[in-house]
Amino acid sequence: MTWDAKSRRFQVVFLPTSRCNARCSYCFSKHGQTQLSLAQVSLVADNVFAYAASRGAREVGVFWQGGEVMTLSPEFVTDAFKRWEEQAASHKMTAVHHLQTNLLRYDSNWRKVIETCFQGKVSSSFDYPNLHRRSLDEEGYTRRFMRNFRRLKDDGFRCGIIAIPNQKTLELGPQRFLEFYFNKLQTHGVQVNLPFPSPSWTGTYQLPVDYTSPLLKFLTELYTLWRNSYRGLGFDLEPLASMEARLTGDTRRSRLPCLFGRNCADQFVAIGPDLTVAQCDCWVLSDPDFAFGNLKVQSLIEIMRSSEVRQQLLERPARLLEGTCGTCEHLGHCFGGCPVRSRGFYGSPLTADPYCELYKGLYDSILTLRRGEAS
């Protein structure tokens, strides 16, 4: 999610509900029963378009997350989408909607919603092996996900997958990992995300940050295997493919996640089901101390201009330059990493990402491999 001055596009993480039908041990969110009303959806959309227009944007990317969106009814999601479209027309702007879902409630009732509201595209998450994702029913997360993922594909939809490695992932190795997503799941690619360090609001965390060395070994071998055996098959491996593209200056292919953005505080915002405004979904439902404000009290334009928390985040790049980031050759590639991870591990978002050494190691490994090929 990035602010692109050329395309004039602003983006928002939209959380219409805090309800979730899963209990994943590494989840950072505090789940509840809060849900936006349709009138509140209109309020959110109106504020988002007004703020985006004040930035000179012409288009808004709306990323539906939760909670779990599919704990809402298909009818509600359709009506909420219409509220967004009404506000877009009112502000003479356009919106592009994206859906993140765990798929545990996917069935044929969602087909028209995905076709109409989300251009036939969905994003979901599943780890190999699954040690930490749990559903609230007796069928179990893995069995239900695999069944519904096949249903989704049979219905003709494309689904991106996010995977979080755990210690067993590293033990099984990159070959087994890629074989699962390419052969068994038969998806077009996978995005490997790193777990968040355990802040005070979660309590469990499956892969310590001091596991950097084996993680780096796994990801380097994964990247090498993908380059040699899977890339030519049309299988995408993110963010490693985009890290390579950034190093080579191929901006058309680089789709790096927000943690590698210049400054997320100036690129997007998140709005939760109680109308809380914060930097991203990681803080909307989890860390009230880092909220920017609330739409019940102020407009989004007022919140973004007056929030002291946001001002701190806007100043983060300058703070990072005062430390080791200032002399790092990869600063222009990672920009200090994710402030949420910094907050979770160090207690402050104004320090470098705790996975800093891992990122540097990956960029160095990619450069080394490419130089070896060139010679």
Image: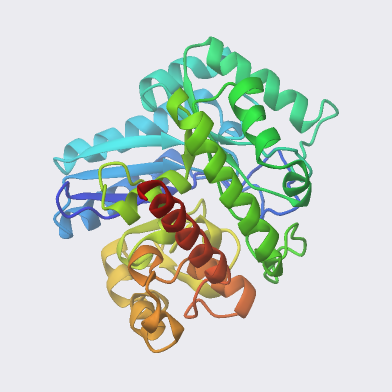
Direction from residue 322 to residue 237 in the image, left or right = right
Direction from residue 208 to residue 222 in the image, left or right = left
Residue 292 in view: yes
Residue 188 pos. (x, y %)? 49, 26
Residue 65 pos. (x, y %)? 51, 43
Direction from residue 24 to residue 61 in the image, left or right = left
Residue 104 in view: no
Q: How is the image coloured?
A: rainbow
**Residue depicted at 64% across the width and 44% down the height:** 19
- Residue 257 versus residue 232: which sits nearer the camera? 232
Mark count: 0
Establish if 226 lies above or below 27. above
**Residue depicted at 17% across the width and 51% down the height:** 57
Residue 255 pos. (x, y %)? 36, 46
Residue 22 pos. (x, y %)? 72, 40
Q: Residue furthest front?
A: 375
**Residue depicted at 70% across the width and 37% down the height:** 128
Establish if 258 lies above or below 144. below
**Residue depicted at 77% across the width and 61% down the height:** 204
Q: Residue furthest right?
A: 138
Q: Quadrant of residue 341?
A: bottom right
- Residue 154 versus residue 305: which sits nearer the camera? 154
